[in-house]
Image (cartoon, rainbow, N blue to C red):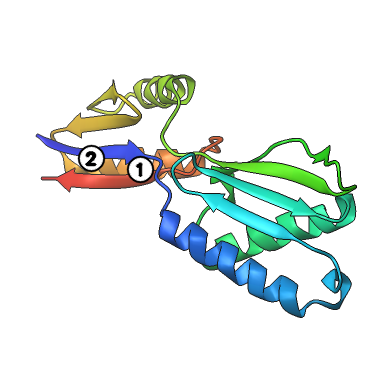
Amino acid sequence: MSSFDIVSKVDFQEVDNAVNNVRKELDTRFDFRNVKTELVLNKKDKVLRVVTGDEMKLRAVTDLLKTHCVRRKVDPKSLEFKEHEATSQGRVKADVLIREGISKDTAQKIVKLIKAAKLKVQAAIQDEQVRVTGKQIDDLQAVIKLMDEQDFDVPLQYVNMKR
């Protein structure tokens, strides 16, 4: 039996590189001169805290973050931007959650979609991933193509292909 796993993983080193590139770009931008902007990445809690001067600057930072993540091959779907709030110093802060793993609801949607395709494969939810097994590699490749055509709320990767 051949199999592969559908997962949603984030390379935190690449996220860290993207955050550092955003910091460098903010240091050189004219519109951020004399504006104290902080980007603090907590890898353990998977949270990026952004603190800057006002809402317009916050939008600029989030756009830069998305752009640099795409350049570093980190899917922006893995970033979840929370609502911003004012700080006591008159600045604006927002948290960006870095999502990893497939939620139970999304995994159930994936399994349901695979079963509806009537391919000769079995799909099983295992923790935060979905394992797909089948006799023929062509059926597994058809599942990968089917998943790529769908738009889920998380980026998907296909790992551990075993023949």
Q: Quadrant of the N terminus?
A: top left
* Label 1 close to label 2 by CB (< 8 Å): yes
Which residue bears the numbered disc 2?
Answer: 4
Which element is circle 2 on? strand
Which element is circle 1 on? helix
- Extreme-front residue of the structure: 89
Closest to the observer, 69 or 45: 45
Say what amino acid the circle numbered 2 marks.
Phe
Query: Residue 41, percent across and down?
Result: 55, 52
Estimate the spatial distance between the alpha carbons at disc 1 and disc 2, rounded to whole Å: 10 Å
| Residue at 70 percent of width and 51 percent of height | 50
Number of numbered discs overlaid on the protein picture: 2
Say what amino acid the circle numbered 1 marks.
Ile
| Residue at 57 percent of width and 60 percent of height | 69
* Left or right side of 136 for 80: right
The reply to whether residue 73 is visible in this rendering is: no
* Residue 142 in which image quadrant: top left
Closest to the observer, 121 or 152: 152
Query: Residue 122, percent across and down?
Result: 24, 24
Which residue bears the numbered disc 1?
Answer: 144
Q: Mark 1, residues whose alpha carbon is within 10 Å: few (<14), some, or many (≥20)?
A: some
* Left or right side of 15 for 116: left
Q: Quadrant of the C terminus?
A: top left
